[in-house]
């Protein structure tokens, strides 16, 4: 409640992103702890395959959510540059960071050695941290609201994985609801912004021209201004950082 009363309404997106980072970090911690506690009995457990799958996916999704949410928070709060980080070969970097988890997961699922299993989780943690941070940094600040809803979906699936790990039906159901609703909301927001969802998620891969930057978008803004008689400079000044970027893009 104290945080609620201290945060301005325009700062709620970055507050949500900060909370999502805690969910992601918690998912990583619970996944690793669950494996350490249950490693000796997982191979004999009839549900051992399900639990090991949940542990690995919880680690990966939680890691992406943690650093991705921190990066989104930094962009919205002005701590990081809102411009996308366009490194050469950024799509290959993202693919490599995500792809390294496939052999790591195979080794994790087939080994009975807890040391090897922990090493695989370590690889997943490190790569997911790097992937989440880099993929989010490659996305512009104006798309951060969509990124936050995507990360919200990720946090829900991480929570769902925790439910399988802990054999907790409530966590599984709530996580599935959060994950599905976040995915649907992300799709709706991208449709409203005339943006392909995959281009937002993968850091601008295959971006199409936005309606906001088109002639039609400028006509809509002009019409909106005439109807509401709003002074655009005042509107831009009063807007949140994310909305300010969108409005400035419309005014170009």
Image (tube, rainbow, N blue to C red):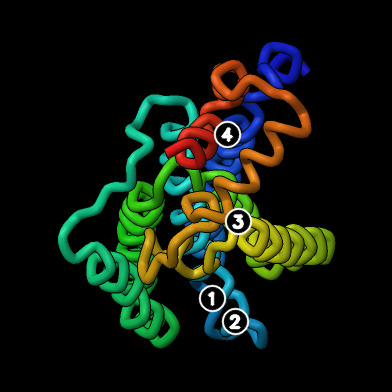
The first of marks 4 and 3 along the sequence is 3
Q: Gap in Å between the C-alphas at discs 2 and 3?
A: 43 Å
Mark 3 crowd level (few <14, some 14–19, many ≥20, 10 Å Cα): some
Q: Nearer the viewer, residue 154 or 196?
A: 196
User: x, y (%) of residue 27?
Assistant: 56, 53
Q: Residue at x 62, y 41 (%)?
A: 221
User: x, y (%) of residue 134?
Assistant: 32, 52
Res. 51 in view: yes
Q: In the image, which disc is placed on residue 48?
A: 2
Q: Gap in Å between the C-alphas at discs 3 and 1?
A: 39 Å
Q: Gap in Å between the C-alphas at discs 1 and 4?
A: 42 Å
Nearest to the eye among marks 2 and 3: give it. 3
Q: Gap in Å between the C-alphas at discs 4 and 2?
A: 47 Å
Q: In the image, which disc is placed on residue 243?
A: 4
Disc 1 element: helix
The first of marks 3 and 1 along the sequence is 1
Kindly identify which residue carries mark 3: 193
* Quarter placement of the C terminus: top left
Nearest to the eye among marks 1 and 4: give it. 4
Kindly identify which residue carries mark 1: 52
* CB under 8 Å between discs 4 and 3: no
Mark 2 crowd level (few <14, some 14–19, many ≥20, 10 Å Cα): some
User: x, y (%) of residue 119?
Assistant: 30, 66
Q: Is residue 106 above or below residue 188?
A: below
The first of marks 1 and 4 along the sequence is 1
């Amino acid at each position: 409640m104290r945080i609620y009363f201290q945060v301005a309404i325009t700062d709620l997106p970055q507050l949500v992103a900060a909370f999502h980072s805690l969910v992601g970090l918690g998912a990583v911690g619970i996944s690793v702890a669950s494996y350490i506690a249950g490693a000796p009995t997982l191979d004999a457990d009839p549900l051992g395959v399900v639990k090991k799958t949940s542990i690995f996916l919880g680690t990966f999704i939680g890691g992406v959510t943690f650093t991705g949410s921190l990066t989104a928070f930094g962009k919205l709060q002005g701590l990081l540059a809102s411009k996308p980080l366009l490194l050469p070969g950024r799509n290959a970097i993202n693919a490599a960071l995500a792809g390294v988890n496939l052999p790591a997961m195979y080794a994790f699922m087939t080994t009975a050695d807890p040391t090897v299993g922990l090493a695989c989780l370590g690889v997943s943690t490190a790569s997911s941290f790097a992937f989440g941070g880099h993929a989010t940094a490659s996305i512009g600040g104006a798309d951060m609201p969509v990124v936050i809803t995507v990360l919200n979906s990720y946090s829900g699936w991480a929570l769902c994985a925790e439910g399988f790990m802990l054999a907790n039906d409530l966590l599984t159901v709530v996580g599935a609801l959060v994950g599905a609703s976040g995915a649907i909301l992300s799709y709706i927001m991208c449709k409203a912004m005339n943006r392909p969802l995959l281009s937002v998620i993968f850091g601008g891969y295959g971006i199409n021209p936005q309606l906001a930057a088109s002639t039609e978008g400028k006509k809509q803004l002009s019409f909106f201004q005439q109807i509401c008689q709003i002074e655009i400079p005042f509107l831009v000044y009063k807007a949140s950082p994310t909305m300010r970027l969108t409005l400035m893009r419309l005014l170009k």
